[in-house]
Amino acid sequence: MSGKDGPDGSGGRVSLDEVERIARLSLLRSDRDEMERLLKDLNTILEHVDSLTKIEVPSDEVGGSSVDGPCVRDEEVEPDPLERPAEQIAPEWQDGFFIVPRLPAVDADEGGGP
């Protein structure tokens, strides 16, 4: 642990009350044992993050890449070709559009349906 007492005096950074609050906000139902396990897991994760922030990395290695600048490639985005043209698989086709029957519910909303 970091040596600092947590809000509940447990030595962790997250308190059991905070874990229970997060569980309520997340609509999770957990018993006391599971809450305590989650508390331990959260504090362990925070300890690992703390240890990572303490690692000294030379400024020439920041970014983890030996490439100067971002690696960018030219991309030509084209639509995937269909096996058959859309007009061949459409039940009805007119002026480049699929023609579909009106829904009875739409007609009913407009007062023209059954």
Image: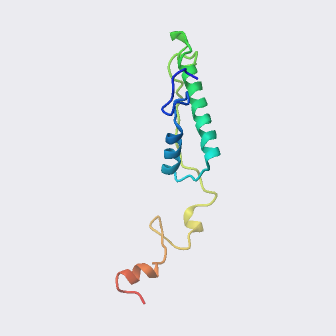
| Position of residue 114 in the picture relative to residue 65 (left or right) | left
| Position of residue 112 in the picture relative to residue 14 (left or right) | left
Q: For residue 85, what is the image quadrant?
A: bottom right
Q: Which is nearer the eye, 36 or 46?
A: 36
Give me the residue at 57% from left, 18% from top. 65
Find residue 44 and report its horizontal and vertical position in percent. Answer: 61, 30
Find residue 62 and report its horizontal and vertical position in percent. Answer: 53, 16
Q: Quadrant of the C terminus?
A: bottom left
Q: Which is nearer the eye, 73 or 69?
A: 69
**Residue 103 in the image: above or below residue 62:** below
**Residue 86 in the image: above or below residue 38:** below
Residue ranking furthest to the bottom: 114
Residue ranking furthest to the left: 110
Find residue 7 and report its horizontal and vertical position in percent. Answer: 48, 32
Task: Please name the colour scheme applied to the rendered image.
Answer: rainbow
**Residue 44 in the image: above or below residue 35:** above
The number of numbered discs placed on residues in the rendered structure image is 0
Q: Quadrant of the N terminus?
A: top right
Q: Which is nearer the eye, 12 or 98?
A: 12
Find residue 86 and report its horizontal and vertical position in percent. Answer: 56, 63
